[in-house]
Image (cartoon, rainbow, N blue to C red):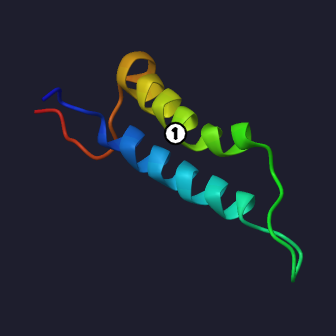
Amino acid sequence: MKNRNVTGMVVAVIYSIVLYGFLIEAPPGEIPNHPRWAYLMIPLGAIAIMALFDFVIKYDFFKDKK
């Protein structure tokens, strides 16, 4: 398995949790009414964040370079 960037994983998980929290919000007594593509932003955004940290930024705050 490829050595993944831990910082990218942490940021992607935080992004997913926050976006899910925004998407499930609705006024009391009503169900959330969002288009289907809005829920698709959770995995696509997480993949984009992981790719950004793996291939562009390439700096990991959690792993020490020896």
Give the residue drawn at x 18%, y 30%.
3
Residue 51 falls left or right of residue 32: left
Residue 33 falls left or right of residue 66: right
Q: Position of residue 26 (x, y in %)?
A: 83, 70
In this rendering, the answer to whether 23 lies above or below 25 is above
Residue 23 location, quadrant: bottom right
Quadrant assignment for the C terminus: top left
Residue neighbourhood size for the residue with mark 1, other residues' Cα within 10 Å, grouped as few (<14), some (14–19), many (≥20): some
Give the residue drawn at x 81%, y 69%.
31
Residue 51 location, quadrant: top left
Q: Tell me which amino acid carries mark 1.
A: Pro
In this rendering, the answer to whether 53 lies above or below 9 is above
Q: Nearer the viewer, residue 24 or 17?
A: 24
Q: Position of residue 52 (x, y in %)?
A: 47, 24
According to the image, label 1 marks what residue? 43
Question: Helix or strand or loop: what does disc 1 sit on?
Answer: helix
